Structures are given as structure tokens and as C-alpha cells.
């Protein structure tokens, strides 16, 4: 039996290291300047990385640590074509020296030819066929790309098409389908509308950010990037109507009052914004100080909620019989965290990377719930525990033992990537719980847990706050679009080394915890 714990107390050096590796909060103008500078230096960066002449870099995100280290995230192009699976992060020391890079794909991106044998029309047809389950499927856009997302195979010229319409449960579709430009064979697909169900309880009496407007107040939070909350009134497109109230007293705690769902959505968005800033020094979802917006009362009895990066917005249904709006804390935290993932690692929403994407939203949504410390919904490691979606009173997902939901994986195996992303996420959710709280039976905020390990080890846990810091740093500076579970292990070990030291108990705990979920 292996026991992993953290020694009491920290040294000054360890504290300095943690502070130095923590990301700085960049203002909107500082971030814009950093991106502009990174793009201006992109050609020299490409040379430093020894990229071939045909490969160019496009700066997408910049994270600056307090110790001067800069992590710049780039997309890659080849002969002017976007490279899917070619993204990378460049790590630069304070003096400008290259410390290293993290690449979604190592090796050459070159393809034999950029002349496609397949026509754009044929590519669209193949994409629509791949999205046969999409109601009203149509390929709204198609572009020529280089597909480099499968590290086991050479890059190929391809088309990427976006198939729109409606999914079976009424969720909008933005299915990205990648087809071989020579044969029309589907190479890869993922759904860009990232869904997740969570609790639909209400948070009691809360304080909202509103703005005075003609005749009263708008549900517009000027203190948090201008977040707005809209009423779709049963619609499924557009923004709907901005919520307005005469006396700034919103909702009555019942779903019959249309404002109640808006109160929960706006409160959840505010708490998530505050959590990001307090825990990670992050200025909004994309780090640019700009808010997303929320839409409530989507469709008719829609039992889901989703993030759409194309509108940079969260959307919430009213649940079964339109009486259980999915608009509470961990739903908001979950959906907004899909946006954070899109702004950072951009984990593909398919296979193992999709499971990590979904787990990230569960992990950070859980962080929001604990941070908020709302009396009506204290923090827990259960997902969807307040809404009886299954009709038997059980939560949607369990982080301490994911398989209790009947579908999720407790441990990694070679078939995990073939599961739905909401179930393959179980491995990372289990990792996060074990890293935070440890194994075995315990009670947190009145909820009992009993977490097993694959290797029968006994883990003490390092605390939720440190686990969150490690996961966020790994996501924002080391994970890429194609990161799988083995890659997540590498990323979190590096993050733990940066924050706490290569010989720290925290890094040892990360290694032991991945072994405990069979990721070695």
C-alpha cells in the first residue's frame, strides 16, 4: 500500500516558486499588446523552432507568469492552409531565450500536394452524410485544410465542413467533419456545441450585477465584462430579449416566474467570473476582460444546456415539463469552462481529448461551487445532484467513483476513447477527486464518498485548491488540441513541477494519482 501525502508547512523557496509560476492577470490592452508582439515575432519563433519555410505561426493566446516566463499558444499553417492538430505552445524565459515547446504534433506537416482531387461540393456531400443523425443537416461552410490530428499517421490534405441543423435532443449542431481531399473518406469529426447537464436548483437570495436603463434596470453586469442575460422565450435562435425589470428585484424562486431562471444564470456567470479571477488571476473566459452572454428558456422542455463558441454564449433549457431550468452554479461553471478550454488548449471534443474537455468543465464547475460557498448549494463532488433526471434521485455523475452512474470509466483502458465524452471524462474526474481528497471513505460538506484506486494504493490528497491550480496551469500552458490521457499526465506533472518543484510532494502526488487511475 502506497501512501502519498503532503508534509506540513512549506519553505520560503517553495512559496516563491509557486508565486513565480502563477499566471499574471493581464488587462485587455496588455493581452492585446502581448498577442501583437507575439505575432510580430512569429517568423523568428518559427525559425527558432526549426520549422520548414512553408510553415507559419498565428498567435492565439499568451500567458505570462510572475517569474517572467511567457507561454504563447500558436496555430500553424502550411502553404497558407490551416493545420488542424498543428497547434503548439512556445515557452520563453524572461530574457527571451526559448525554454521549449509543447506540440500537438511533432515532426513535419508537409503534404504531397495542395491540389485536391475531391471537389468542394463532394466534400460537403460527404460531410452531410457523416452527420446523418442531424435533423435538417446542411454543410454551411467548407474549407481546405491540412489534417495532422492523428499522430500515428502522416498529415494529409483535407476539407473541414461544418454541418448545422439540430441534434436528436434539440441541441443545435455545429458538427465539424474532416474528409480526405483525395478520397472523401471521413478522417475525424467532433461536435463544436459542447453540452452538459447539471443541477437546476436555485441559489436562494443572491446579489446580481445590473445596469440602470430607461424605465428600470437591465440584467447587464458591467462589473464583469458586460455579461447580459436574454430570454429566448421558447425560441432556438438569435439572442432573444434582454431581461429588464422596473424595481431591480428579480424573480421569485419559482420556475413559473420567467426571471427566476435568468437570476440563476446571471448569478452562475458572475460567480464563475469571480472564481476565475480569484483562483487563477484570469480576466474573463478568454482572458480579454470581455464577458460571454447567457440565453435562458431555450426551446420547449429542453433538458440540457450548452456552450457555443461561435456566439461565445451559454444557453439553458427549462428541463422536463419546463419546470426545472438548468441554470444553477455548476451548470454555469461547467458551460463557461467549455469556453475557457476553447480559448486555451482547444481540446478536440472527441475521443480522449473530448473526455478531458468535458472533465475540465466538471472540474472547474466543481471549483465554482466550492468557491461560491452558497448555503443553498454547498460544494460537492457530485454532478447534477439536485435534479432528478433519471427519476431515481441519483446524481448525473460522481467524481469519487464515476462508474456509479452506470456508464463512466473509473480508470483508463485502451477503449476509453471510444466512449461518449461525458463518460470518458470519468478518468480525469476520478483523478481530480483523488488528487484533491485522497482515497477511501470520507465526508465533505455532509456528503459521503468512498473512492477506490486501480492499483490499491492509499492516497491522502493534496487539497482541492492545489489540484485546481495544477489542472488550470496544465490546461492553459501545456495541453493542446490533441492531448490524450497520457499527454494530460505529462502536462500536469510539468505544471506541478513549475508550481511546487520537481521533487515536491505535490508532483509525487500527481504521479501516484495518475497511476491510481491506470494512466502511467
Image: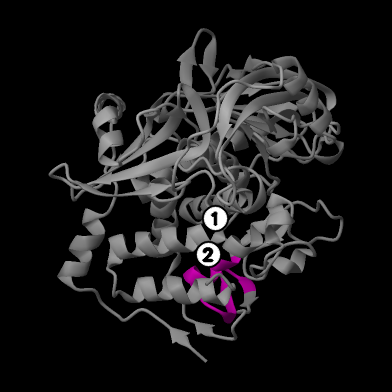
Q: Image quarter for residue 375?
A: bottom right
| Residue 477 as seen in the image, left or right of residue 82 | left
Cβ–Cβ below 8 Å for labels 1 and 2? yes
**From this viewpoint, is residue 58 visible?**
yes
Nearer to the camera, 409 or 207: 409
Residue 16 in the image: above or below residue 5: above
Residue 22, label in figure: none
Question: What residue lies at 39% left-to-right and 57% top-to-bottom?
Answer: 469
Coloring scheme of the render?
A: one colour
State how far apart marks 1 and 2 are (Cα): 7 Å
Residue 432, label in figure: 2
Is disc 2 placed on a helix, strand or loop?
A: helix
- Find out whether residue 144 is within the magenta segment: no
Q: Image quarter for residue 315?
A: top right
Is disc 1 placed on a helix, strand or loop?
A: helix
| Residue 483 as seen in the image, left or right of residue 318 | left
Give the residues in magenta. Answer: 430-448
Nearer to the camera, 25 or 198: 25
- Find out whether residue 441 is within the magenta segment: yes
Q: Position of residue 505 (x, y in %)?
A: 34, 76
Q: Position of residue 500 (x, y in %)?
A: 29, 66
Residue at the outermost top position: 214
Residue 443 in the image: above or below residue 24: below
Question: What residue lies at 63% left-to-right and 53% top-to-bottom?
Answer: 355
Question: What residue lies at 68% left-to-right and 49% top-to-bottom?
Answer: 199
Residue 356 in the image: above or below residue 44: below
- Provide the residue designation for mark 1: 363
| Residue 492 as seen in the image, left or right of residue 395 | left
Please report whichever mark, 1 or 2, sits nearer to the chain's N-terminal start. Answer: 1
Q: Position of residue 335 (x, y in %)?
A: 59, 40
Amino acid at each position: 500500500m502506497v501512501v502519498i501525502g503532503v508534509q506540513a508547512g512549506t519553505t520560503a523557496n517553495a512559496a516563491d516558486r509557486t508565486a513565480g509560476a502563477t499566471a499574471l492577470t493581464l488587462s485587455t490592452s496588455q493581452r492585446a499588446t502581448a498577442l501583437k508582439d507575439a505575432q510580430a515575432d512569429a517568423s523568428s519563433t518559427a525559425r527558432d523552432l526549426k520549422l520548414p519555410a512553408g510553415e507559419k505561426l498565428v498567435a492565439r493566446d499568451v500567458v505570462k507568469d510572475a517569474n517572467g516566463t511567457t507561454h504563447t499558444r500558436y496555430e500553424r499553417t502550411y502553404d497558407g492552409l490551416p493545420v488542424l492538430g498543428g497547434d503548439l505552445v512556445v515557452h520563453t524565459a524572461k530574457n527571451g531565450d526559448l525554454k521549449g515547446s509543447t506540440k500537438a504534433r511533432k515532426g513535419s506537416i508537409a503534404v504531397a500536394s495542395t491540389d485536391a482531387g475531391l471537389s468542394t461540393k463532394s466534400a460537403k456531400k460527404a460531410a452531410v452524410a457523416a452527420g446523418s443523425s442531424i435533423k435538417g443537416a446542411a454543410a454551411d461552410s467548407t474549407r481546405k485544410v491540412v489534417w495532422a490530428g492523428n499522430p500515428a499517421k502522416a498529415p494529409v490534405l483535407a476539407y473541414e465542413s461544418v454541418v448545422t441543423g439540430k441534434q436528436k435532443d434539440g441541441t443545435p449542431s455545429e458538427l465539424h467533419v474532416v474528409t480526405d481531399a483525395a478520397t472523401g473518406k471521413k478522417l475525424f469529426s467532433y461536435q463544436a456545441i459542447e453540452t452538459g447537464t447539471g443541477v437546476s436548483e436555485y441559489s436562494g437570495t443572491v446579489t446580481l450585477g445590473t445596469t440602470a436603463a430607461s424605465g428600470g434596470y437591465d440584467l447587464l453586469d458591467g462589473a464583469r465584462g458586460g455579461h447580459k442575460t436574454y430570454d429566448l422565450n421558447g425560441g432556438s435562435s438569435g439572442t432573444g430579449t434582454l431581461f429588464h425589470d422596473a424595481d431591480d428585484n428579480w424573480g421569485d424562486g419559482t420556475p413559473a416566474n420567467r426571471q427566476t431562471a435568468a437570476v440563476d444564470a446571471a448569478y452562475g456567470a458572475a460567480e464563475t467570473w469571480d472564481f476565475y479571477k480569484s483562483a487563477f488571476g484570469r480576466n474573463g473566459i478568454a482572458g480579454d476582460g470581455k464577458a460571454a452572454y447567457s440565453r435562458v428558456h431555450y426551446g420547449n422542455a429542453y433538458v440540457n444546456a450548452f456552450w457555443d463558441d461561435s456566439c461565445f454564449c451559454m444557453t439553458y433549457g427549462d428541463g422536463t415539463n419546463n419546470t426545472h431550468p438548468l441554470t444553477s452554479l455548476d451548470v454555469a461553471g461547467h458551460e463557461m469552462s467549455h469556453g475557457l478550454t476553447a480559448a486555451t488548449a482547444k481540446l478536440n471534443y472527441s475521443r480522449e481529448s473530448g473526455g478531458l474537455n468535458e472533465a475540465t468543465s466538471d472540474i472547474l464547475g466543481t471549483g465554482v461551487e466550492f468557491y461560491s460557498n452558497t448555503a443553498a448549494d454547498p460544494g460537492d463532488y457530485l454532478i447534477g445532484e439536485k435534479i432528478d433526471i433519471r427519476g431515481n434521485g441519483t446524481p448525473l455523475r460522481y467524481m469519487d467513483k464515476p462508474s456509479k452512474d452506470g456508464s463512466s470509466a473509473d480508470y483508463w483502458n485502451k477503449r476509453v476513447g471510444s466512449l461518449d465524452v461525458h463518460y470518458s471524462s470519468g478518468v480525469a474526474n476520478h483523478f481530480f477527486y483523488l488528487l484533491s481528497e485522497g482515497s477511501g471513505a470520507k465526508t465533505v460538506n455532509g456528503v459521503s464518498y468512498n473512492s477506490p484506486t486501480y492499483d490499491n494504493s492509499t492516497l491522502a490528497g493534496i487539497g482541492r485548491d492545489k489540484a485546481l491550480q495544477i489542472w488550470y496551469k496544465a490546461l492553459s500552458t501545456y495541453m493542446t488540441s490533441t492531448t490524450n490521457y497520457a499527454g494530460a499526465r505529462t502536462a500536469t506533472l510539468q505544471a506541478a513541477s513549475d508550481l511546487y518543484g520537481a521533487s515536491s510532494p505535490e508532483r509525487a502526488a500527481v504521479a501516484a494519482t495518475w497511476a491510481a487511475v491506470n494512466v502511467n
